[in-house]
Amino acid sequence: MVDTMLTLGAELSTRDFAPTRKVYTGLCAFLKAKPEFFEAAGYDSVHHLDGVYGWSHPLCSPGLEATYLDWSHVDCITHEESVHQIAATLVSLLQSTTEQPVTHASKLSGKSDS
Amino acid sequence: MWLQKGDPSKPALVFLHAVWGTPIGAKMIRHLPGDWPIISLQAPELDRDCPVNSLLERAASYRKLLVDELHGHNQTVHLVGYSFSGALSFELALCLKDSTLCCGSLCLVDPVPYCPQPKSAMSFLMHRAQCYDLFLGSMLRKKAMRMEAVSLNDIACVSDLEHYVVSATSRHIASHGWLIPCSP
């Protein structure tokens, strides 16, 4: 498992951050745990002004607001209250998709299919 | 793996594994409607070779897996990514456009920030110890100790580290009777 962690961790360095690359224009939700984990790891975007770790650009959602989970990064996926909060977000998100057509990715300059 | 078969005419909810590769989302099922098909993806390299060299290749590989698994089902999927898989689910959402599947929504749970990884001056041994601390801290609720032991030179090589982890895990199982806790 630790070998897998090292492999997957290394894959993160292959991410493409080119400003011209495709962005996601569909429905999305963003949940944030306490920032200590990513702060300790030294990520610059933890305190990005967009409030969503710099994801507002690739998610093409300048107004995207985070839902806060009052737990650490590791605990937020296992603690009962946090799990309940995530599930409630999912129910709400999926219910909203029945009211809107599904969307795809598009080039930033051609955000036409959302 | 299917966490819940649900109604195949409904869109599937797909959880993507975190950096340790094991499926997530099992604890969430009882809070979700019983008719939702729910899949949780596990990193294939946990039980077989996986010829993938980048996040993009991994996303394409998972796309193929989902296309095969959801043949005959509703072709809309809702993706949930946590930590590492926040970045992965984003790539998967983008590349689903080139398949029969359609991304209905994307839910990112404390995803890894959208910026390059910080440069690390850690040795391989320290990095490996960090992985153990993250995994065991999450699964066993054990205080992080491996990195400390490496920095104090109590652990000097990978085989020492593996021995240290096996001993600690065995002690945990002997006293608790389990490896992975049901709740924190």
Image (cartoon, rainbow, N blue to C red):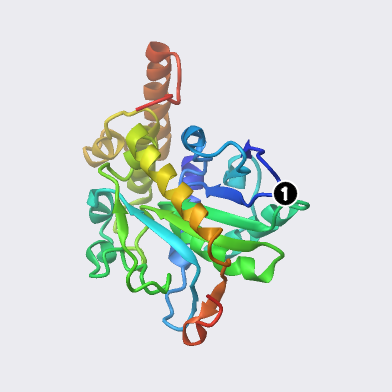
**Among the 4 quarters of the image, the one containing residue B46:** top right
| Quadrant position of the N terminus of chain B in the picture | top right
* Residue at screen point 53% across, 40% down: B23
Q: Position of residue B122 (x, y in %)?
A: 30, 53
Q: Residue furthest bottom?
A: A109
Residue B160 position, x and y percent, is 38, 32
- Relative side of B105 to B100, left or right: left
Residue occupied by mark 1? B69
Mark 1 lies on a secondary structure that is: helix
Q: Residue furthest right?
A: B72
| Residue positioned most to the front | A99
Q: Quadrant of the C terminus of chain B?
A: top left
Please report the residue visible at 26 percent of the width from the left and 64 percent of the height from the top. A51
Can see residue B134?
Answer: no
Quadrant of the image occupied by residue B98 = bottom right
Q: Is residue A25 left or right of residue B41?
A: left
Residue B134, compared with residue B16, is above or below; it is above
Name the amino acid type tagged 1. Glu
Residue B7's place in the image compared with A98, above or below, is: above
Q: Could you tell me which residue is drawn at 26 percent across and 61 percent down?
A: A46
Q: Residue at x 67, y 38 (%)?
A: B5
Quarter-of-image position of residue B102? bottom right
Which chain does tag 1 point to?
B
One can see residue B23 in this view: yes
Label 1 crowd (10 A; few <14 / some 14-19 / many >=20): few
Residue sitting nearer the eye, B19 or B17: B17
Residue B161 percent location from the top left of the image: 38, 34
